Image (cartoon, coloured by chain):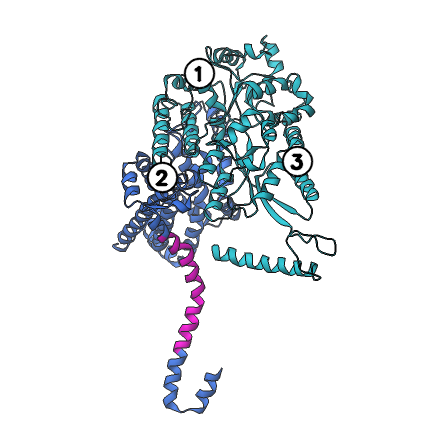
């Protein structure tokens, strides 16, 4: 592998040199200084960038912003972007793992928020503090800083924010005389939500739709039920799951999910468009679902808050894809320019619009007035006031896999305590073995 | 070329040496033909395997290749204490023990069915063979919706017969059997093709002669078809076993090893530990054990069939 890379490097090196020679056949090219012909002979730095494959307006955004970047930095930096298939679960992460082992990571890399700590702890991304001014950092919403910070250093900037809300079908609500709350103080409790499901579920209509996928989604969405109950799935330092994920409050949250499954209030294998087709009265989903609703003109939808535990706090998931610079990069300064560009005010606002996700920068909301009114107001309120990031721990891959597996099992009827005990011991073993030193 | 000219000019004595030369040249040509294959085999089969053996004795996190540490037999100690390893081993063996005979029997029956003079036999052959040439991932996704516990096609069919809805992939009791059923359906066509080739090489006169002796269809099957197919059967059983032990795609796509690890196989365990948890050392140790199991199985199968 290394040899081949060296060979490739040699070939590209020779090509670059011959190109340069062609350009500067006049005088000697001094680094950066202007020659007597008035033109600085500067090598254009090529920066590679990986991001997960998206579709529609999101893809358009990336292509457009990369084009604009290349125009703005013409002659200095050439940004080459490569979309990588993400698939349904962890295909993108697998690709990153393989690239780390073979040292073929690109200069700039997108990563899902909870992986930041793992990548930082493994030394495969570099801190960005020196490239950002304080004011610039303060412009990010707090959860972005929280997600991107590991052991006091800022490693990755969020491209957008996210949230999970409860969508509802207005027609079905009207039919049963249900008024979903529009004030965060009145957010439904689990029991109230359960009653709504009980009322609305019949025949081929489910009370809710809440399985996006059985991978990361399970942790992303349902960890909040642990938080709302007053616990979490690991302790604050991220060193221990025993007594957290399987605490009494945790068991209660998991049992609630199992109850919904047992009473068939949601479909464990739903069609992706179940809610859109009117086959589910409510849906736990995110802003990313909204663009697709347009394809269903019969659907009248509204948004309310992520349900909370009766005596617990209102909280909601957060976190987004972030972008950072790999340790392998030979041009960290130029790579940081790319990171800053992809997360500046314009990018933040444009991406937020393209994918109808909340923006990662406060200043971006200036150009997003739609977030001041219902239904999107709910999202902005959640993002700016009650959101919690996923655990910042280097052993996150094991945590999320085991937790997602356990929750899926629980929904299919497995013993609640046993499943969560397994998560706790698997996580604690892994942390002890690999990260405790 | 120069060799030829020397051969012309020299006498019988050097003719002997030139034959030796010729032989050596031939063997050099022969070796040079297999050289690329051997090199590639070493590069992509032997080397990774040796590396896996080495990594099996280390603590090796995929994201930190620089921090690799020799830990002796630690991984193996862990492994033999790991409940999930035994569960995966059990699942793998269960799948193999059920799939190999069932799939081979189904394949043989299909082959017998399409090996007649029916007008539509090509239609049937294509029908049975088409799942084989379709990607397993596609088929797995298809079967997820067929098996859907709420609105799957299979449940609708059961419903019409008055049988209650079954959870299939979403229950620890049924998931593995559901995977077995779809795997047999998918792969039997391949073995059918091999059996078909075998069937067609059985001389027709055997059947004619036996018919004249008054043998019925069943006797013909028992005393002519099966014995004539013996070598084909051994081959089919062997490749089916090796295929079955490597079970990965179906559980990976359909259940991710769940529910309650009831479909976690050794291959899936290795993948999860190695690539998702990044514990390359531990995953290597599991794959070494896995390799030994496969070798043992093929060894015993070979002995078993040779003794007959």
Q: Secondary structure at mark 1?
A: loop
From the image, tell me which residue sits under label 1: A229
Q: Is residue B97 left or right of residue A325?
A: left
From the image, tell me which residue sits under label 3: A61
What residue span does the magenta drawing correspond to? B23-50
Give the chain of mark 3.
A
Q: Is residue A54 magenta?
A: no
Q: Secondary structure at mark 2?
A: helix
Give the chain of mark 1.
A
Q: Check whether the beta carbons of the residues at disc 1 and disc 2 lie within 8 A of each other.
A: no
Question: What residue do we see at 33% from left, 50% from top?
Answer: B53
**Where, by quadrant of the figure, is residue A430 drawn?**
top left
Q: Secondary structure at mark 3?
A: helix
Q: What distance separates the C-alpha of mark 3 from that of mark 1?
A: 38 Å
Q: Which mark is residue A170?
A: none
Q: Quadrant of the C terminus of chain A?
A: top left
């Amino acid at each position: 592998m290394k040899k081949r890379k060296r060979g490739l490097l040699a070939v590209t090196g020779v090509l670059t040199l011959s190109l340069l020679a062609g350009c500067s056949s006049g005088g000697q090219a001094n680094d950066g200084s202007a020659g007597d012909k008035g033109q600085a002979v500067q090598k254009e730095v090529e920066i590679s960038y990986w991001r997960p494959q998206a579709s529609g307006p999101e893809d358009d955004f990336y292509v457009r912003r990369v084009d604009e970047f290349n125009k703005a930095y013409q002659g200095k930096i050439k940004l080459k972007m490569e979309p990588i298939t993400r698939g349904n679960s962890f295909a993108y992460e697998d690709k990153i793992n393989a690239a780390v082992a073979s040292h073929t990571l690109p200069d700039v890399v997108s990563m899902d928020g909870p992986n930041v700590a793992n990548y930082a702890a493994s030394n495969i991304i570099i801190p960005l503090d020196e490239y950002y001014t304080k004011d610039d950092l303060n412009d990010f919403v707090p959860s972005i800083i929280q997600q991107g910070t590991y052991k006091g250093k800022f490693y990755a900037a969020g491209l957008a924010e996210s949230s999970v809300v409860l969508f509802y079908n207005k027609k079905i609500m009207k039919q049963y005389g249900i008024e979903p709350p529009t004030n965060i103080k009145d957010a439904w409790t689990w029991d109230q939500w359960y009653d709504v499901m009980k009322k609305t579920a019949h025949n081929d209509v489910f009370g809710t739709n809440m399985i996006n996928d059985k991978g990361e989604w399970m942790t992303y969405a349902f960890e909040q039920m642990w938080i709302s109950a007053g616990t979490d799935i690991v302790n604050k330092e991220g060193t221990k799951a025993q007594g957290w994920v399987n605490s009494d409050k945790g068991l209660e949250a998991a049992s609630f999910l199992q109850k919904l499954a047992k009473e068939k209030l949601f479909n464990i294998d739903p069609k992706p468009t179940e809610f859109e087709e009117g086959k589910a009265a409510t849906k736990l989903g995110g802003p990313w679902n909204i663009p697709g609703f347009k394809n269903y003109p019969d659907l009248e939808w509204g948004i309310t808050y992520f349900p909370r535990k009766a005596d617990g706090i209102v909280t909601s998931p957060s976190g987004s894809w972030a972008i950072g610079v790999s340790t392998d990069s030979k041009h960290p300064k130029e790579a940081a320019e790319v990171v800053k560009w992809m997360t500046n005010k314009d990018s933040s606002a444009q991406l937020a619009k393209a994918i109808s996700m909340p923006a990662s920068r406060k200043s971006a909301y200036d150009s997003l007035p739609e977030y001041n009114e219902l239904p999107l107001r709910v999202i902005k309120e959640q993002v700016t006031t009650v959101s919690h990031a996923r655990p910042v721990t280097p052993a996150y891959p094991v945590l999320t896999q085991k937790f997602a597996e356990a929750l899926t099992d629980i929904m299919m009827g497995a013993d609640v305590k046993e499943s969560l005990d397994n998560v706790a011991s698997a996580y604690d073993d892994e942390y002890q073995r690999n990260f405790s030193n | 070329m120069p060799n030829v000219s020397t051969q012309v000019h020299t006498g019988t004595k050097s003719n002997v040496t030139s034959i030796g030369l010729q032989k050596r040249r031939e063997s050099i040509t022969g070796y040079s033909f297999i050289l690329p294959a051997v090199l590639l085999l070493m590069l992509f089969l032997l080397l990774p395997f040796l590396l896996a053996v080495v990594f099996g004795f280390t603590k090796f996190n995929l994201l930190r290749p620089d921090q690799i540490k020799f830990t002796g037999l630690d991984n193996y100690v862990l492994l033999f204490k790991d409940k999930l390893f035994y569960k995966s081993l059990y699942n793998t063996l269960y799948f193999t023990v059920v799939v190999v005979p069932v799939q081979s029997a189904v394949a043989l029956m299909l082959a017998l069915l399409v090996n007649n003079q029916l007008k539509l036999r090509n239609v049937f052959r294509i029908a049975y063979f088409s799942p084989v040439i379709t990607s397993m991932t596609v088929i797995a996704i298809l079967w997820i919706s067929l098996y859907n516990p709420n609105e799957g096609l299979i449940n609708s069919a059961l419903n019409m017969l008055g049988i209650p809805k079954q959870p299939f992939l979403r229950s620890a009791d049924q998931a593995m059997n559901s995977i077995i059923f779809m795997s047999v359906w998918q792969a039997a066509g391949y073995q059918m093709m091999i059996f078909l080739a075998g069937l067609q090489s059985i001389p027709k006169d055997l059947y004619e002669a036996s018919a004249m002796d008054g043998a019925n269809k069943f006797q013909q099957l028992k005393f002519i078809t099966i014995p004539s197919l013996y070598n084909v059967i051994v081959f089919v059983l062997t490749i089916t076993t090796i295929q079955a032990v490597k079970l990965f795609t179906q559980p990976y796509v359909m259940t991710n090893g769940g529910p309650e690890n009831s479909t976690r196989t050794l291959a899936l365990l290795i993948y999860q530990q190695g690539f998702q948890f990044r514990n390359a050392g531990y995953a290597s140790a599991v794959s070494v054990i896995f390799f030994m199991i496969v070798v043992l199985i093929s060894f015993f199968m070979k002995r078993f069939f040779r003794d007959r």
